[in-house]
Image: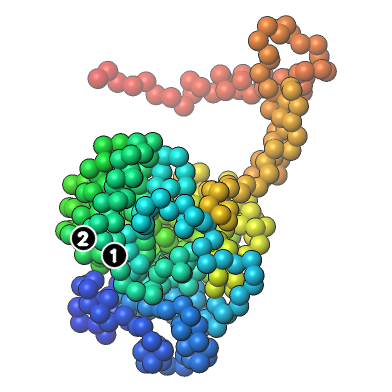
Amino acid sequence: MGANGFIPEDLADAEDWRAQLRNSIRDVEALKARFPGLPDPEGIARAAARFPFSVTPYYASLVEKPSFDDPIFRMSVPSPEELDDPPFLLEDPIGENRHMVAPGLVHRYPDRAMLISTSFCAVYCRHCTRKRITGAKRGAISEARLDEAAAYLKAHPEVKDVLVSGGDPLLLPTPLLERIVRKIREVPSVEVIRICTRAPVTLPMRIDDELLAMLRRHGPIWMNTHFNHPRELTPRAVAAAGAVVDAGIPLCNQSVLLRGVNDDPLVMEELVRGLLRARIKPYYLFQCDLVRGIEHFRTPISKGLEIMEHLRGRVSGLAIPCYAFDVPGGEGKVPLLPEYIVSKSETHTVLRTWRGLFFDHPEPRPAGAAPEAPAGTSWNDDFCARAITDRRTSDRDFGEWLEEIPEV
Ligand code: SF4
């Protein structure tokens, strides 16, 4: 394998994404050949019989040791733990079937809809929310069904934003993906198209000139991708992300909080810093959906809050994703936030900073209130005194570090 996950040396045409797919590992015998010392092949086979798998040679090259302790291996190789099936886990945890308004088209929020365009992915992520769809068959939405979806969108001009998802839409041949994108673009009320893909992570060579030229023709297009661990940010993946951004396609990242992969504040900090360097905006950090087959990946919500606490103040706000849980039944995402408001009253709100200090925020005086409120009632005298001192300090320093701008 390439030392940095750039090109696996055992695959002659590693830069050809179709060759990557042709040479993907899809059964236990191929896994054993690729990873001598494979742990529990019988257990892997049992899990694979329930939930299929596929791993590109590129993604397999990122595995450092064939063990479920290795985050790349853990996310891509079936584990017997997937057969743990507590009753609160669901086939369709976020109610997509219930909100399917045309074949493949899910409409859960007023202004957004999502099109499930294919069931095909380069790597079948073991934590996938759509395990019920992905991997079973390599299918794409037919032209007739696409017409039905487009007809729904035309009849619902409130939908401004369409996510093309799957499976992974970038696994479709470019002309087939263009047929989908063009059909959506023909709906006058659709303003933005978003492509949801893990190809930059698992098959970065898929980001080729033909694809980018096609996407540019149908903008504005955004791309959501799915990096979960800093080791996925290889030079090859970063180059693919850079090509997307250079083509004028903003790139955002949706991670899933996964036990044994990224449930560590330092790992998550490294991930979001790496994403920002690669010009990818960390967008969401999802609490695991309640989907069958992923109990071993789930973490308590307190773990996600601990990670968010860690990130705030330590990394730029630009690098901080929104931590959220998609409520079962399709009722939407709930943002999950550490508590920063300590107390509230009509006159003051007490805030906690990321360092754990408290700050007393004076609320604006109601319209028509007396300019000088009685001391000790609605205004905090200490706070006012400190604010006046800070203001004077600021006034004094202002001229000392500014240079005059030359005439232009
Ligand atoms: S690429 Fe996306 S749709 Fe495909 S298996 Fe992974 S998470 Fe699921």
* 84 versus 210 height, above or below: below
Identity, as a three-letter code, of the amino acid under mark 1: Ala
Q: Please say whether residue 352 is visible from this viewpoint.
A: yes
* 303 versus 18 height, above or below: above
Q: Residue at x 69, y 37 (%)?
A: 341
Structural crowding at the residue carrying mark 2, measured as other residues with C-alpha within 10 Å and reported as few (<14), some (14–19) or many (≥20): some
What colour scheme governs how the chains and residues are painted in the rendered image of this protein? Answer: rainbow
Kindly state the secondary structure of the residue where label 1 is placed.
Answer: loop
| Quadrant hosting residue 191 | top left
Q: Which residue is drawn at 37% across and 52% down?
A: 102
Percent of width and height locating residue 304: 61, 57
Question: How far is the residue under mark 1 from the one under mark 2?
Answer: 9 Å
Q: Which residue is drawn at 33% across and 43% down?
A: 153
| Quadrant hosting residue 294 | bottom right
- Residue closer to the observer: 2 or 402: 2
**Label placed on residue 176:** 2
Percent of width and height locating residue 82: 55, 77
First reached walking from the N terminus: tag 1 or tag 2: 1
**Label placed on residue 393:** none
Q: Mark 1 points at which residue?
A: 140
> How many numbered discs?
2
- Residue closer to the observer: 153 or 303: 153
Q: Is residue 61 left or right of residue 366?
A: left
Percent of width and height locating residue 337: 62, 47
Of circles 1 and 2, the one toward us is 1
- Residue closer to the observer: 204 or 333: 333
- Residue closer to the observer: 371 or 85: 85
Identity, as a three-letter code, of the amino acid under mark 2: Leu
Residue that sits furthest to the right in the current view: 376
Q: Quadrant of ligand 1?
A: bottom left
Percent of width and height locating residue 397: 54, 23
